[in-house]
Amino acid sequence: MSSAQRTPDPGQRIDIPAVPNLRDIGGYPTATGGRVRRGQLYRSTDLTHLQGADLERFADLGVRVVFDLRTADERAAEPDVVPEGTEVVVCDVLQDRTGAAPALVLQALGDPAAAERLFGDGRSAQLFEGGYREIVSLPSALGAYRAFFTTMAEDVSRPALFHCTTGKDRTGWAAAATLLLLGVSEADVFHDYELTNRDLLPALKPLFEQFRAAGGDPVLLEPVFGVQPAYLRSALDEMDQRFGSIESYFADGLGIGPDEQRRSREALVEP
């Protein structure tokens, strides 16, 4: 097979500049000897900046439903732009969360001293590890992911794309939970998760340079705008403590029972 004909590796970046961190989560092998179907599920940042050629390229993906995992404030500040005929379904994961973490992050970008207070000395890791536990356990998160998984499992809803703001945390858990349910190994799940550092951080270089110009150390921002395995590990630990397994998370946490889980596997895994 020539290089032109070779099937791309899982996790290959889809090059649409207005939507960094965009990739197909298909292609990963499963425990049953199958492979997650390509061209069915995509993950990304928000779709606020789609226009012109980028919008046309996005339309070529054939996405029928976009699942927006962001809060009402995030959606109001940066509304999605989607091709005509694409449905947007809101699944607000953090609706029940108290505090203003996104606002604090934005404020810190213009104030290196505030950023140091928020994120220095390992505080960013503590912040995100706690946040990932909420992504698994908040009532709003359970409701949002139930809506996402039940709707996404319907053939008429795919191809589908799911996203939050940067496509790494709420989106990261949606991708991880999907792949685990389909029988993808934990090693491959972490591989897909950590590709955000490859795909997103370079796109944020202007933001990092702006922070440097204000007197800040860009290294401080890497664990804030990138991902670390410990973040996803916290979510998995929360899932194990509360539910015991990925199947029980779906059944007891999301109300998606064994029969529905099996139908999802049949729809999204090719032999």
Image: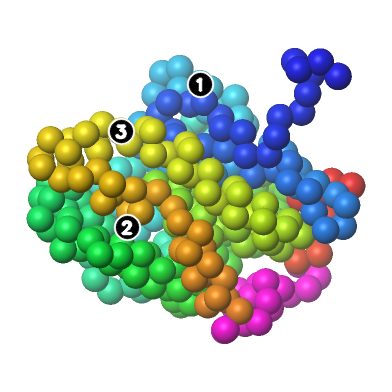
Q: Position of residue 263 (x, y in %)?
A: 80, 61
What amino acid type is highlighted by mark number 1? Glu
What amino acid type is highlighted by mark number 2? Ala
Give the residue drawn at x 76%, y 17%.
Answer: 3
- Dot 1: element: helix
Residue 143 in view:
no
Task: Answer with the quarter of the image where residue 169 lies.
Answer: bottom left
| First in residue order: circle 3 vs circle 1 | 1
Q: Position of residue 79 (x, y in %)?
A: 33, 42
CA distance separating discs 1 and 2:
27 Å
Q: Which mark is residue 56?
A: 1
CA distance separating discs 3 and 1:
25 Å
Residue 77 in view:
yes
What amino acid type is highlighted by mark number 3? Lys
Which residue matches tag 3? Answer: 205
Q: Position of residue 224 (x, y in %)?
A: 33, 53
Query: Would you say 245 lies left or right of 194 here?
Result: right
Q: Is residue 163 magenta?
A: no
Q: Which mark is residue 170?
A: none
Residue furthest to the front: 121
The region drawn magenta spans 241-260
- Dot 2: element: helix
Q: Which mark is residue 72?
A: 2
Give the residue drawn at x 57%, y 84%.
Answer: 242
- Dot 3: element: helix
| First in residue order: circle 1 vs circle 2 | 1
Principal secondary structure, stretch drawn in magenta:
helix
Q: Position of residue 94 (x, y in %)?
A: 38, 66
